[in-house]
Amino acid sequence: MLDRTIGIQTAINPAAGPFGWTPLAPGIGAEIHGVDVSKPVSDDVFAKILDIWHDNCVILFRNQNLNEEQEWNFARRFGETGKVQHKHNGGSKLPGVMYISNIRENGELIGSLPDGEMYFHHDQCYTPDPAIATMLYAMEIPLSGGNTLFTNMFKVYEALSPAQRALAESSSVMHVYDYQAHPTKRGAEIREGVPHHAHPMVRIHPANGRKAVYVNRLMTDHICGMDREKSDAVLEQIFALSEEPRFIYEHVWTPGDLLIWDNRSSAHARTDFSASERRLMRRVAIVRPNP
């Protein structure tokens, strides 16, 4: 069982400066300064954080030193935390807490999604009620690789041609969780019993009314009701568009980094890393906004 009070291994978290933010990349993301999320955040400051997040899809807080409960408490400011879809909760009794790790103890993985590259995806899009947001905290990272990439699906929608927009707004897509024991590849068909669910191809964000494309290379299997060959061709065009560098921020992790991304307006991916190096992250899934 993991120590639920674990934070990062070095003393960081210097005195916070004034509140503010800077862009992470031209296409997506904001780094927020002057906030120690291990301590209570005022309603006024949190309202500003929410606005920045809704506009930029991804927010980063550096130099945090968080135990499990502190991270979970901050996640609950964004909304209700949900159950872990996988078994690796480290023995936590807090809903939505999950560990992402390749570390093994007594021959058993202590976390989920341990190794290698992952294509762009939206968390839990294969369920009836996908996570609206994900919070991920870095505790141990490899010397290189294991980076997380984010793409702005608001801007992907805006970059569609009029014909593509019309098709997307009138279509639903089937998302599938089935990599045949390999978390980077879709199966050739939807096998019986694997989790899958259809959602509209375009989502309207409840906070700002902006439209975002809701497809991803890892989990989106087909456009519902469309010939497979045509569906594959349409989706490939949108996958390729969403993976253009102008929409992407690549985050190189440092212990103490805390990232929160909006699954309604962004998709994310992971780069490969050496299986011989340790990687330990703590994730909290947020399933619906607070009333």
Image (cartoon, grey):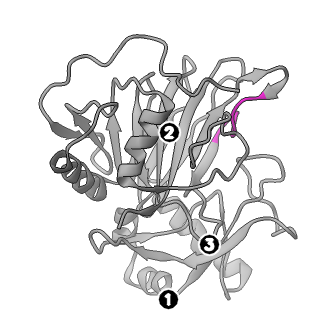
Name the dominant secondary structure of the magenta segment.
loop
Residue on which the image places disc 3: 128
The image quarter containing residue 283 is top right
Alpha carbon of mark 3 to alpha carbon of mark 1: how far?
Answer: 19 Å
Relative horizontal placement of residue 13, taking residue 121 as reference (left or right) = left
Q: SS at mark 2?
A: strand
Give, as a single range, the part of the protein colored magenta.
109-117
Q: SS at mark 3?
A: loop
Q: Residue at x 53, y 22 (%)?
A: 6
Q: Position of residue 222 (x, y in %)?
A: 67, 74
**What amino acid is found at the position of numbered circle 2 in the picture?**
Thr
- Circle 1 packing at 10 Å, graded few (<14), some (14-19), many (20+), is few
Residue 111 magenta-drawn?
Answer: yes
**What amino acid is found at the position of numbered circle 1 in the picture?**
Ser
Residue 99 magenta-drawn?
Answer: no
Question: For the view shown, which residue lies furthest in the right direction?
Answer: 192
Q: Is residue 220 above or below residue 46?
A: below
Query: Which of the two discs, 2 and 3, labels the residue nearer the N terminus?
Result: 3
Residue on which the image places disc 2: 148
Q: Is residue 52 above or below residue 227?
A: above
